[in-house]
Image (cartoon, grey):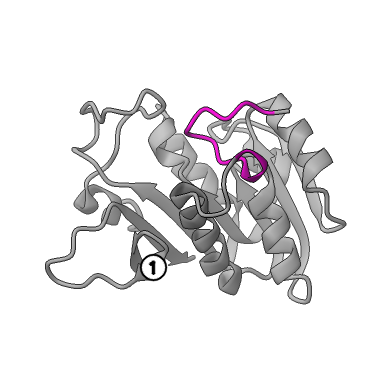
Amino acid sequence: MLEYTGERVIPDLMKPANALLLEHLARYQFSSYHIRGRVLDLACGSGYGSQMLAKYGKKRIDELIAVDVDPVTIDYAHKRYNHPLVDYRCEDATDPLLPQKLGMFDAIISFETLEHLEDERQFLSNLYNMLKPGGTLVLSTPFGKGRGKPCGSPFHVHQLTIDEFNGLFPEYKEVKMYYQKGVLIEPPYPGVKYPLGIAVCTK
């Protein structure tokens, strides 16, 4: 059984009304409208979201590859959230060889990954190189004081500013920005301070 640390979402160890759990479920439901074909859930964690995507998108997806760097977590995900369409694998999101290992995808989902990584550039390069032309990337991260600045979380390298996050996707043909506050995900409204951003990018 995985241990709940306050960072990794493990629904079996959390109350149904836990705010963190509800926020993560909302992101997966939001992203379910953007998946089709061959799908990657990069940094899938305990696997609840990968299974959720497979159930919601069973008529639109062919295969879902769910990847996390921790072998214990992947073993838990495979046992607890098994689904015929989901293939759980243990890989590093910043491995330069990841595109060769996993291949190409019609849609890539990666939630709350960026802030954990030292090698942001390699991670973003992997995402782009694994996405098919016309494919969709849905990526989220919490906002903070900016790149290279302390953010108060022992689990995060740093947390980007809104402007830094918005500037991550110049190579994509189309980028739509959404922002989340609680379970509400919406385009930005003036005067509202959002703790987290979600980019929906088309290659």
Q: Quadrant of residue 121?
A: top left
Q: Do we see residue 33 in this rendering? A: yes
Farthest top residue? 154
Can you give x and y, in whole percent of width and height, for residue 194 in the image?
A: 25, 57
193 or 11, which is in the foreground? 11
Assign a secondary structure to mark 1.
strand
Q: Which residue is mark 1?
A: 185
Badge 1: residue crowd in 10 Å (few <14, some 14–19, many ≥20): some
In the displayed structure image, the side of residue 177 where residue 101 appears, left or right: right
Name the residue rendered at 41%, 69% in the picture. 173
Can you give x and y, in whole percent of width and height, for residue 74 in the image?
A: 73, 34
On screen, residue 59 above or below 138: below
145 or 199, which is in the foreground? 145
Name the residue rendered at 63%, 38% in the picture. 13
Give the tally of numbered discs.
Answer: 1
Q: Which residues are magenta?
A: 2-13
Farthest left residue? 191
- From the image, give the main secondary structure of the stretch colored magenta: loop
Magenta span contains residue 9: yes
Farthest right residue? 84
Magenta span contains residue 29: no
Task: Residue type at mark 1: give it.
Answer: Ile
In the displayed structure image, the side of residue 35 where residue 142 appears, left or right: left
On screen, residue 107 above or below 1: below
Q: Do we see residue 128 in this rendering? A: no
